[in-house]
């Protein structure tokens, strides 16, 4: 009976380890690759500063004059306005890049 109980506990722990939150994994991976900027994840704007990712609470002006709003609207320094696509990041210098996503997201 003890062996069965130990085996069940081991299965539960291994299953919970496999059921990690992919959103958290994505944000952690993005924090590792891009230090400062904003990114759109699951339709929500997130701020990445010094390796920490948190919800974007106010508009940000990048060093080149580009403004990124909390709804994902980007007002470029040349006056054009676009919507940031899912998985894309605007760095603090105004550069846009696609963030690396893990397979199966």
Image: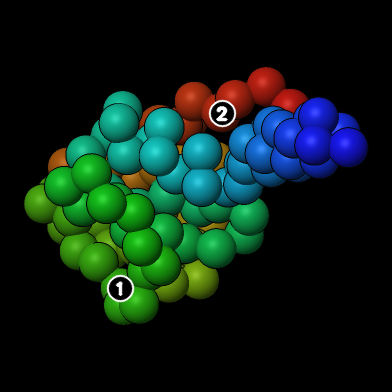
Q: Position of residue 102 (x, y in %)?
A: 59, 25
Which residue lies under the disc numbered 2? Answer: 101
Image mark for residue 49: none
Q: Position of residue 24 (x, y in %)?
A: 51, 47
Does the image show residue 19? no
State the residue in front, 80 or 21.
Answer: 21
Is 34 above or below relative to 65? above
- Between the C-alphas of marks 2 and 1, the distance is 25 Å
Q: Secondary structure at mark 2?
A: loop
Image mark for residue 59: 1
Q: How many marks overall? A: 2
Q: Residue furthest bottom?
A: 58
Tell me the mark number nearer the camera, choosing from 2 and 1: 2
Query: In the image, is 35 to the left or to the right of 72?
Result: left
Quadrant assignment, res 62: bottom left
Is 46 above or below relative to 27? below
Quadrant assignment, res 91: top left
Q: Position of residue 76 (x, y in %)?
A: 32, 54
**Of the residues under marks 2 and 1, which one precedes in the sequence?**
1
Residue under the point 62% across and 42% down: 20
Q: Secondary structure at mark 1?
A: loop
Residue under the point 40% across and 39% down: 28
Q: Residue furthest left?
A: 63
State the residue in front, 90 or 42.
Answer: 42
Locate the N terminus by quadrant: top right
Q: Residue furthest front?
A: 1
Badge 2: few (under 14), some or many (20 or more) residues near its Cα, within 10 Å? some
Q: Position of residue 45 (x, y in %)?
A: 47, 62
């Amino acid at each position: 009976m003890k062996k069965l109980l130990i085996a069940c506990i081991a299965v539960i722990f291994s299953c919970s380890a496999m059921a990690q939150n992919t959103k958290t994994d994505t944000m952690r991976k993005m924090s590792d690759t891009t230090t400062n900027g904003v990114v759109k994840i699951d339709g929500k704007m997130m701020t990445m500063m010094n390796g920490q990712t948190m919800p974007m609470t106010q508009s940000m002006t990048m060093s080149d004059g580009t403004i990124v709003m909390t709804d994902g609207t980007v007002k470029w320094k040349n006056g054009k306005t676009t919507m940031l696509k899912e998985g894309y990041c605007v760095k603090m210098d105004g550069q846009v890049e696609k963030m690396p996503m893990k397979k199966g997201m």
